[in-house]
Image (cartoon, rainbow, N blue to C red):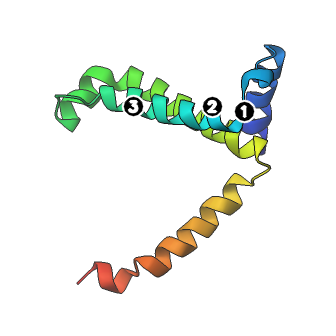
């Protein structure tokens, strides 16, 4: 994960984009890219959307992930750690025994 984040930041720095990347605008970009991902499914069944739009779906997932990793990096967050912590919270909120009833 660290190497991927480093490569993303290098790509951004090579183009001098960091100056335009503040936390608010990156968060907005995550939302916009997620909406673009949703567009691939609009008015289609999941199966149709995947069959017809898989390349676009891959691109939009990548955009969401790239912006999310940029924001995490800019905030000094360890992505692995915060995901693991969230999984622990989710495990307490949604214990297996209650989900299988």
Q: Quadrant of the C terminus?
A: bottom left
Assess disc 3: are there few (<14), some (14-19) or many (≥20) residues with their C-alpha within 10 Å of its C-alpha: few
**Image point (40%, 77%), residue name:** 94
The residue lying toward the viewer, choosing from 51 and 92, is 92
- Helix, strand or loop at disc 3? helix
- Cα separation, mark 1 vs mark 3, equals 20 Å
Is 80 placed left or right of 35 in the picture? right
Residue 1 in view, yes or no: no
Q: Position of residue 22 (x, y in %)?
A: 72, 32
Please report contact status of discs 1 and 3: CB closer than 8 Å, yes or no: no
- Between disc 3 and disc 2, whose residue precedes? 2
Q: Which residue is mark 1?
A: 22
| Rendering quarter of residue 28 | top right
The residue lying toward the viewer, choosing from 23 and 61, is 23
Instruction: Name above or below for residue 13 compared with residue 15.
Output: below
The residue at the far top in this view is 15
**Image point (40%, 21%), residue name:** 55
- Between disc 1 and disc 3, whose residue precedes? 1
Q: Position of residue 58 (x, y in %)?
A: 45, 28
């Amino acid at each position: 994960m660290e190497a991927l984040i480093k490569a993303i930041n290098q790509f951004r720095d090579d183009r001098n984009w960091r100056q335009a990347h503040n936390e608010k605008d990156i968060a907005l970009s995550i939302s916009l890219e997620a909406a673009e991902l949703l567009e691939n499914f609009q008015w289609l069944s999941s199966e149709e959307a995947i069959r017809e739009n898989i390349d676009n779906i891959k691109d939009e997932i990548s955009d969401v992930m790239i912006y999310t990793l940029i924001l995490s990096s800019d905030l000094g967050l360890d992505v692995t750690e915060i995901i693991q912590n969230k999984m622990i919270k989710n495990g307490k909120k949604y214990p297996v025994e209650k989900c299988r009833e």
